[in-house]
Image: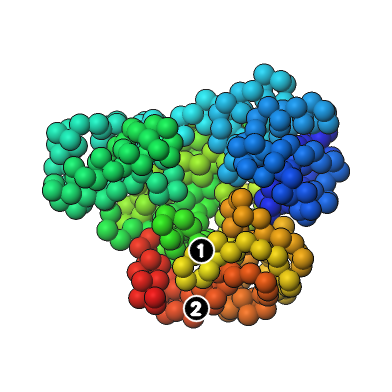
Amino acid sequence: MFQKILIANRGEIALRVLRACKELGIKTVVVHSTADADAMHVRLADESVCIGPPPSRDSYLNIHQIVAACEITGADAVHPGYGFLSENAKFADILAAHNITFIGPSGDHIRIMGDKIEAKRTAKRLGIPVVPGSDGAVSEEKEAKRVAAEIGYPVIIKASAGGGGRGMKVARTEADLEVALATARSEAGAAFGDDAVYIEKYLEKPRHIELQVFGDGAGRGVHFGERDCSLQRRHQKVWEEANSPALNEEERARIGGICANAVADLGYSGAGTIEFLYENGEFYFIEMNTRLQVEHPVTEAITGIDLVHEQIRVASGGGLSVRQEDIKFNGHAIECRINAEDPRTFTPSPGTITHFHTPGGLGIRVDSGVYSGYRIPPYYDSLIGKLIVHGRNRVECMMRLRRALDEFVVDGIKTTLPLFRDLVGNSDIANGDYDIHWLEKYLAKTE
């Protein structure tokens, strides 16, 4: 087991990893920018190292500073959390060259899954169902028209190196295709430094279903069930739940088995999430995230397994602590991402939190790194915290969620709490009857 882990992140995920390390008796080091000097994870860590000014590129994305912090403090492993350097293959390679363990997959696996075109090819080879589309990058309008005609309109053009909705354009007719192709390539080049795009069939009313998987790096793989992340705004997840209201046990076992076998065949090590669009009983691979997900707590709630403990165990060479038959699903869990944003316009709302009170009681968990008097900086993601609610079934879970949202108090800044209070009372949400377009349509109607 590791002696000391450096946590290369901030906010609630840094605190989440820190708690797991403390439970395992592992010393912790956190890095922080000058803007985060008073952050909760900095206060609670065994050691802290300031690695630069507020801009991420000068601090949390500064690989050399983070490696130097490891060497100064004697950290023998790095947990990257999510975001920042968590899916940076170069970072994983540099740590390996310095004999520091990256708590995550190999640099090679990060590269494969980080390239959307190569990831799709790999998924297809591993037996994972994929969305019909181009075999690789498409650059010429003539080729784009041929592919679109073969798979049928509407189609969606996606950036190969993309994420977060950037470099994605829908073309419903051939007349739309030329502008959509040029716009997607331009956005992709500006956002990712790579203008390669590919084409897929655009599904009209899909759900976003993702499978939590783990590999031991030696040919074993397991899955921890699925999460439904269909409630999204601009391709950003807002509300996640496990298990999905749309799947039955047979479908869950089928797609879970496919994904577990795939990570085993790949020789994958650590946590990963295989994401799908799901429509009319069919799953279509869209990407694999080679890291811990923001929404991992709902999986922990229904399985009773600490996924960060599992990450650390696998990275230290201890292998998986569970077999597939050991993983049981208990009840239902929902996570709401509480952001420092206007609940209608979603404009960021940095500032000082004058009062902060979290809900409690059976089945309630709040992952947050803020406190009364804490100032939300304007430089980073606007996530304040995550409210995770667990019940014996979805009805009980929704009842607890409604009560927890009423108890949650964040004063001094605008938050998205009012949005969730609206959603929990909506009949479509209560019935689990929604898709990836539902939230944006709902918001348009309530403007």
Q: 306 left or right of 447?
A: right
Image color mode: rainbow
Q: What residue is drawn where x is 49% and y is 65%? A: 346
Query: Local crowd at mark 2 within 10 Å, few (<14), some, or many (≥20)?
Result: few
Closer-to-camera residue (231/309): 231
Q: Say if residue 427 shows up in the picture.
A: yes
Q: Which numbered tag is attached to residue 422? A: 2
Residue 297 position (above or below residue 54): below
Give, as a three-letter code, the residue at label 1: Thr
Give, as a three-letter code, the residue at label 2: Asp
Mark 1: which secondary structure?
loop
Q: Locate residue 74, reporting x and y percent.
A: 83, 28
Query: Local crowd at mark 1 within 10 Å, few (<14), some, or many (≥20)?
Result: few
Closer-to-camera residue (125/156): 156
Q: Locate residue 79, reporting x and y percent.
A: 69, 38
Q: Nearer the viewer, mark 1 or mark 2?
A: 1
Q: Which residue has dot 1 on it?
A: 347
Q: What residue is drawn where x is 77% and y is 31%? A: 69
Mark 2: which secondary structure?
helix
